[in-house]
């Protein structure tokens, strides 16, 4: 299931054993499975995506760093 969401704070992911990478604040799409959440975004002409463990995603939501659907404030 794909959901619309908004990153409002510092959300990071890691590619393999590399350093943490911050996802810029703004609108994203989220698709979840039993194990992970895939976040997708557009930044100018660049498209990005990151898969993060579902537990990390839920922690970001609980802390208010990611707002989902109904939680997104009007523009």
Image: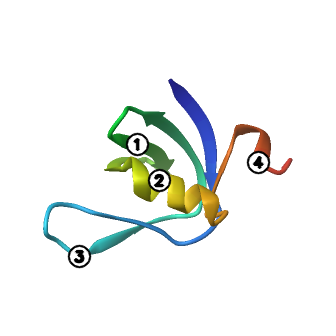
Front disc: 1 or 3: 1
Q: Which mark is residue 19?
A: 3
Q: Residue 28 appears at what percent x and percent y?
A: 55, 45
Which of pointers 2 and 3 indicates the residue nearer the eye? Answer: 2
Q: Check disc 1 and report the residue beneath it.
A: 37
Q: CA distance from mark 2 to mark 1?
A: 7 Å
Mark 2 / mark 4, whichever is N-terminal: 2
Pointer 4: what residue?
72
Q: Earlier in the sequence, mark 1 or mark 3?
A: 3
State how far apart marks 1 and 4 are (Cα): 18 Å
- Image check: 40 left or right of 73? left
Q: Indicate which disc, 2 or 3, sits on the residue closer to the N terminus.
A: 3
Residue bearing mark 2: 57
What secondary structure is marked by label 2? helix
Residue 75 position within the rendered picture, expressed as x and y whole percent measured from the top left? 84, 50
Q: Please report contact status of discs 2 and 3: CB closer than 8 Å, yes or no.
A: no
Q: Residues within 10 Å of mark 1 (few under 14, many from 20)?
A: many
State if disc 3 and disc 1 touch (CB < 8 Å). no
The residue positioned 32% from the left and 40% from the top of the image is: 35
Lower sequence index among marks 1 and 4: 1
Residue 64 lies, in percent from the top left, at 67, 63
- For image coordinates 48% across by 46% down, the residue present is 42
Q: CA distance from mark 4 to mark 3?
A: 29 Å
Instruction: For marks 2 and 3, give the CA distance.
Output: 18 Å
Can you give x and y, in whole percent of width and height, for residue 57 in the image?
Answer: 47, 53
Mark 2 vs 1, N-terminal side: 1
Residue lying farthest bottom? 19
């Amino acid at each position: 299931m794909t959901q619309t969401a908004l990153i409002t704070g510092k959300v990071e992911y890691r590619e393999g054993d590399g350093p943490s990478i911050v996802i810029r604040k703004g609108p994203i799409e989220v698709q979840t499975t039993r194990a992970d959440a895939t976040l997708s975004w557009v930044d100018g002409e660049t498209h990005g995506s990151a898969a993060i463990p579902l537990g990390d995603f839920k922690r970001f939501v609980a802390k208010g760093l990611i707002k989902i659907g109904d939680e997104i404030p009007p523009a």
